[in-house]
Amino acid sequence: MQDYREIMEKKSLMIQKIKPALVGQKIAIGGLISGIQKFVTKNGRLMLFTKLEDWANKIEIVVFPNILEKNPDIWREDNIIIVQGKVSQRNGTLSVICDGAREFLINGKRT
């Protein structure tokens, strides 16, 4: 990921810059998926709690079923993605509620 740091910083906010003052605001962040927890809703649909990390920090990304079903293939460990979403805070911990995501591509190629 280090090779892509400069490009990533131009396209997204670094995780360390996500602060409580941003709660409720839409942002874009990029990073590597370093962990995935699957959860089945009471309606029987799959949702995810993923860990996204950049060079120095990690944050939880909450992926609800409607977002997951639009593009399930990108949600895999070690994939580098850009996430759009809204900053949320629960029990003092910041997270991002995903509104959309795409793979991080350079010159049309997967990273």
Image (spheres, rainbow, N blue to C red):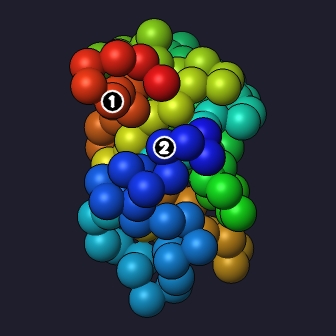
Q: Is residue 2 above or below residue 100?
A: below
Q: Which mark is residue 35?
A: none
Q: Is residue 88 above or below residue 103?
A: below
The outermost residue toward the bottom is 21
Cβ atoms under marks 2 and 1 closer than 8 Å:
yes
Q: Is residue 65 left or right of residue 90?
A: left
Name the residue type under label 1: Ile
- Mark 2 vs 1, N-terminal side: 2
Q: Is residue 57 left or right of residue 89?
A: right
Image coordinates for residue 72, horizontal then vertical, percent: 43, 14
Residue sitting at x 28%, y 64%? 26
Total number of numbered discs in the rendering: 2
Q: Is residue 56 above or below residue 73?
A: below
Q: Which residue is mark 1?
A: 106
Q: Is residue 71 above or below residue 52?
A: above
Residue sitting at x 67%, y 71%? 93
Q: Is residue 75 left or right of residue 23?
A: right
Determine the image quadrant of residue 58. Answer: bottom right
Image coordinates for residue 95, horizontal then vertical, percent: 56, 60
Q: Which residue is mark 2?
A: 4
30 or 95, nearer to the observer = 30
Residue sitting at x 30%, y 37%? 100
Instruction: Characterize the local packing of mark 1: few (<14), some (14-19) or many (20 or more) Cα atoms within 10 angstroms.
Output: few
* Secondary structure category for the residue under label 2: helix
The outermost residue toward the top is 73
Is residue 38 shown to the viewer in this render? Answer: yes
Image coordinates for residue 20, horizontal then vertical, percent: 51, 84
Determine the image quadrant of residue 105. Answer: top left
Q: Quadrant of the N terminus?
A: top right
Name the residue type under label 2: Tyr
